[in-house]
């Protein structure tokens, strides 16, 4: 098959730029690689969306698991596609192994944190200690996981502030996942009243305050504990159970404190 005249003229003026892996790279081959790489990035994104919204849509998997599977599919497509592109342009990957090893050592030191976050992201997606939609507490951060990426995890706080946390933090630091066990969780509210107050009255008022809150579960029932008998003030601890996906714990604590304050003041019981 004879090439068009304009294409033959273009190939005649094609300029050799460099050689990589035994394959000469010209202007046209570089353009070809760029076009193929852009197409690969688009195709990998399309495969991720198809996996999440089509292939796994009717399965029993939750949103977080589908998102993790879609991300893994995208990375696999990118890796395999990049190898195929290099082979398509004639690059001998075996010849690049020594160079890649040497470059990899140098780049590894410079990109240690990036690589660590990337590997941590893969671990999170596979082990799933957290997933999209989980409510987590980490240091001074409390919010809902919105997205788990290759390098960072997006958390939206209860104030609608978006925080980007490196994935490594979820592997090396202590993270509280409030919904991990898919079970109700308990909230403890400490209360101290003045010495001489009637303990049974205080316990009754604390339980009334707990039962007045609609977010507090009736079963398991709220209870009042006496954590210590040391010291003049009387120390109590109101323990209530609530849905992990339900109220924000700080908000529930505030509501309970308001209910407790109203009842203690009405009963003329002073704080310590």
Image (tube, rainbow, N blue to C red):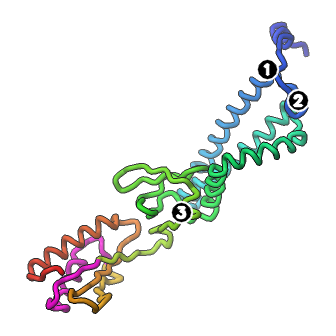
In the image, taking residue 238 as reference, residue 68 lies left or right, namely right
Query: Label 2 crowding class (10 Å Cα cut-off): few <14, some 14-19, many 20+?
Result: some
For residue 200, above or below residue 262:
below
In this rendered view, identify the residue nearer to me: 248 or 49: 248
Q: Please give the label number shown on residue 28.
A: 1
Tell me if I can see residue 70 in this picture. no
Tell me if I can see residue 48 in this picture. yes
- Contact (Cβ within 8 Å) of mark 2 with mark 3: no
Read off the magenta span.
190-217
Q: Position of residue 68 (x, y in %)?
A: 60, 55
Marked residue nearer the N-terminal end (2 or 3): 2
Query: Label 3 crowding class (10 Å Cα cut-off): few <14, some 14-19, many 20+?
Result: many
Q: Quadrant of the N terminus?
A: top right
For residue 216, above or below residue 168:
below
Q: Secondary structure at mark 1?
A: helix
Q: Residue at x 62, y 51 (%)?
A: 113
Q: Is residue 215 magenta?
A: yes
So how many labels did they put on this image? 3
In the image, taking residue 29 as reference, residue 156 lies left or right, namely left
Marked residue nearer the N-terminal end (1 or 3): 1
Marked residue nearer the N-terminal end (1 or 2): 2
Q: Which residue is mark 2?
A: 23
Q: Which residue is mark 3?
A: 130
Residues at marks 1 and 2, CA–CA distance in whole angstroms = 13 Å
Q: Residue at x 82, y 46 (%)?
A: 101
């Amino acid at each position: 098959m004879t090439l068009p005249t304009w294409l033959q003229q273009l190939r005649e003026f094609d300029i050799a730029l460099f050689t990589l892996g035994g394959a000469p790279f010209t202007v046209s081959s570089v353009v070809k690689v760029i076009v193929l790489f852009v197409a690969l990035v688009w195709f990998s994104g399309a495969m991720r969306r198809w996996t999440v919204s089509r292939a796994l849509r009717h399965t029993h998997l939750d949103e977080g698991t589908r998102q993790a599977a879609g991300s893994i599919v995208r990375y696999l497509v990118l890796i395999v596609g990049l190898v195929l592109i290099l082979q398509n342009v004639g690059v001998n990957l075996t010849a690049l192994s020594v160079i890649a090893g040497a470059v990899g050592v140098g780049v590894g030191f410079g990109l240690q944190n990036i690589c660590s976050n990337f590997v941590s992201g893969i671990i999170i997606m596979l082990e799933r200690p957290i997933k999209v939609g989980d409510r987590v507490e980490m240091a001074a951060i409390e919010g809902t996981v919105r997205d788990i990426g290759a390098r960072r995890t997006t958390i939206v706080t209860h104030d609608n502030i978006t925080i980007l946390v490196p994935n490594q933090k979820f592997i090396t630091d202590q993270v509280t996942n409030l919904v991990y066990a898919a079970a109700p969780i308990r909230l403890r509210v400490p209360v101290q009243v003045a010495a001489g107050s009637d303990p049974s009255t205080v316990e009754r008022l604390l339980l009334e305050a707990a039962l007045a809150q609609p977010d507090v579960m009736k079963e398991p029932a709220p209870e009042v504990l006496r954590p210590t008998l040391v010291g003049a003030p009387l120390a109590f601890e109101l323990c209530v159970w609530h849905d992990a996906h339900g109220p924000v714990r700080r908000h529930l604590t505030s509501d309970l404190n308001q209910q407790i304050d109203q009842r203690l003041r009405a009963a003329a019981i002073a704080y310590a």
